[in-house]
Image: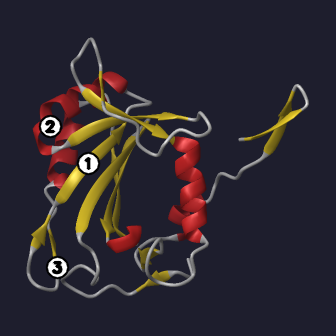
Amino acid sequence: MARREMYPEGHLPDGVLVVTAAIDVQQDRLELEFRGWGLGEETWGLEYIVIPGNPGSVELWESLDQHLQKEFKTVDGIILKAACTVVDSGAFTQNVYDYCRKHQPSRVYPIKGASTRGLPIVSKRSKDQKTNVVFFVLGTDTIKDTIFGRLGVEDKGAGYCHFPLTYNAEYFDMLTAEHCVTRFKNGIPRRE
């Protein structure tokens, strides 16, 4: 929370070149975050939104449509929208696939996490054989290691993570809830 900072009013922080959106699907809500990206993968949390409702309902996904129309303005007056949106397909998979299939021309893709050590952050694109939906497999262990490493970057610039004053303690509790442990299987240490 000590990293939170005041962003300029009415426009994106200087350095944001691209905006992305990510959606986590929970039993009673969608959690959406817009993130700005700059050179060297410097990032800015832009907006975190909880959209309550049943992910099995059409109404909740229609509400998401409205949120994804959000526009962000640079200091130069350029309008940016999410260049790509990813939706976690671990829960309500069919609803996620239905939504993403309809929106894939707008670069909205389902993602599947795989906790196999050594997987790249994003694997090559795949296509679901039954639905023809393009999806991506994410190396969740690699992502978590990367995020925790980035949270250790103290100087603004490449790899630094910025957060706005609007992010509360609950956001940071969720962000840092997991930790790495070493477990032994047949006498061999494994990080999990």
**In this rendering, is residue 150 above or below 177?**
below
The kind of residue tagged 1 is: Thr
Query: In the rendering, which numbered label is found on residue 23?
Result: none
Foreground pick, 163 / 51: 163
Residue at x 60% of width, y 54% of height: 145
Q: Amino acid at mark 3?
A: Thr
Asked if residue 3 is positioned above or below residue 20 in the image, the reply reads: below
- Count of labels shown? 3
Marking on residue 85: 1
* Residue with the mark numbered 2: 103
**Tag 3 and tag 2, C-beta contact below 8 Å:** no
| Classed neighbour count for the residue bearing mark 2: other residues with Cα under 10 Å, few (<14), some (14–19), many (≥20) | some
Badge 3: how crowded within 10 Å, few (<14), some, or many (20+)? Answer: some
Q: Earlier in the sequence, mark 2 or mark 1?
A: 1
* The quadrant where residue 88 appears: top left
Residue placed most toward the observer, 85 or 69: 85
